[in-house]
Amino acid sequence: MPQFSLEQVRSIMDQTEKIRSLSIIAHVDHGKTTLADSLVSRAGIISTKAAGDTKFTHGRKDEQERGVTIKSTGVTLCLEHDQGDGHGQQPYLVNLIDSPGHVDFSSEVTAALRITDGAIVVVDCIEGCAVQTETVLRQALQERVKPCLFVNKVDRCILEMQMEAEDMYLRFRNAIENVNVIIATYNDSSMGDLQVRPELGNVAFGSGLHGWGFSIETFAKILSAKSGMEKSKMMEKLWGDWFYNPKKKVWTNVQQPEDCEEPLQRGFCQYVMNPINQLIRAIMDKDSEKYEKMMARVGIVLKGEDKNLTGKALMKHVMQNWINAGESLVAMVVMKLPPPKLAQRYRVENLYDGPMDDEAAMGIRNCDPSGPLMMYVSKMVPAADKSRFYAFGRVFSGTVATGQKVRIQGPHYRPGSRDDLHVRAIQRTVLMMGRGTELIQEVWDHHHFGRCPQLH
Ligand code: GDP
């Protein structure tokens, strides 16, 4: 796991194209917290084995006692991703907000969404789209937050329901279609086409609980290297009505061509779901001959103590090594969700009430560190001694630094009101990194806790 120093983190903050701010949204119990663990574990904060077992973003007890952990916890993660552009692994800063799933916290969901530019929508593939999936996705779209989708709990289709690949395909397709109906209903088209489609790479599937997941791109990469077909073309073949005819060595959209005795398998089933299904079942059936062969084919070698693993522990280990959920999530987030500079161009109208040609609006639109300071505070948290507050939020324009004088405009602020007269100095500026806070001199384009005098 890569380890980053605070200086490195600070330097990534200066390259805003390397920043992504997102929340994970879902109907309650669809697995958003568990999935957040997969991302956190990729950042090297908790080990991969602990993913799914540790509810990291729900906060540890000692953090709750310090008063810093809140219902909508924000955490900044340092993650590496190789875009395949020849630059190798590059560091990214991912600000992750775990918004509350319960409808009672609706205003907190909105506050969490306002400081993000993207959202991973988690849908339990057994239950499909549910009431709160629609509620939170609608809120996200109203905030001009771009969605991508994670179809979760696929392990249950395989292990509990013993489903075949085609049945899983139909179930996934149904969930995706329902999400797209919601998107079509609430998209105000300021962000262009927002439909989620596996062939575009903005849909991932997997098991947050077992720490594995993939997008079509994961498999298209491997297959295109073997077949010589372009990756984007291969992605199209791995979703929808595309079938590979091995006799003629061609892709067709006819499931049973005249020259075939048996119906052909859908690309998604043949090249994606069947290998996953078969590997998991072979491990759980303790068919070592079969799973060892399959593992060798996908390049997984057990070393040291891992050789003693059996059953579920072996299955989780193998799957996490083969198609890691955190890795697939990082790839999807980096490639499909916008960096702040891009997002603020179309979000400015939603974020700011004043004239669109004034200094503040320009600062937000251009994500300008030397513009006037415009920070949205999504949460005020009392510090341990209760005499101070941490203001958690995002800087959309300007730069916030320790000692700087700021004005706080409350939710009922009107120009010329009393709030205009209260100027307060920021006493500390900190970053929420992993398990704790880090003192930092100045912050921009970022989520942070600024420590301010108590509000009257
Ligand atoms: P949240 O309410 O959306 O944050 O959901 P949680 O992450 O707390 O998960 C709700 C329940 O679903 C817990 O019992 C999890 O263990 C379980 N769960 C989450 N992800 C998966 C998954 O991928 N597979 C299975 N089988 N269970 C899961």
Image: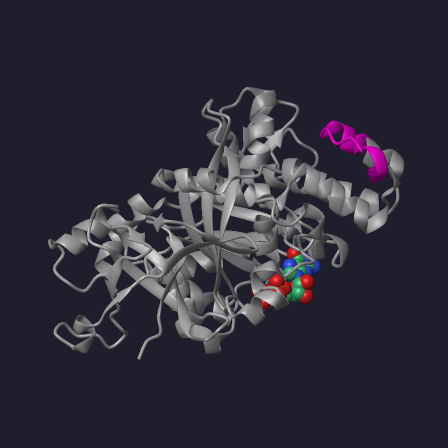
**Is any atom of residue 345 visible in this view?**
yes
Q: Residue at x 35, y 41 (%)?
A: 16
* Residue 404 locus on image (x, y percent): 27, 57
* Residue 219 locus on image (x, y percent): 59, 34
* Above-or-below relation of 72 to 258: below
- Let me know if residue 297 is in the magenta part: yes
Q: Is residue 17 left or right of residue 104?
A: left
Q: Is residue 16 left or right of residue 303?
A: left
Q: Residue 299 occupies which quadrant of the picture?
A: top right
**Quadrant (top left, top right, bottom left, bottom right) of the C terminus:** bottom left
User: Where are the magenta residues, as a range?
Assistant: 293-306
- Let me know if residue 423 is in the magenta part: no
Q: How many marks?
A: 0
Specify the quarter for ligand 1.
Answer: bottom right
Q: Residue at x 82, y 39 (%)?
A: 306
* Residue 39 locus on image (x, y percent): 57, 49
Q: Residue at x 70, y 58 (%)?
A: 53
Q: Decide which of 307, 430 is in the foreground and name it.
A: 430
Q: Decide which of 82, 142 is in the foreground and name it.
A: 82
Q: Residue at x 66, y 31 (%)?
A: 260
Q: Decide which of 391, 185 is in the foreground and name it.
A: 391
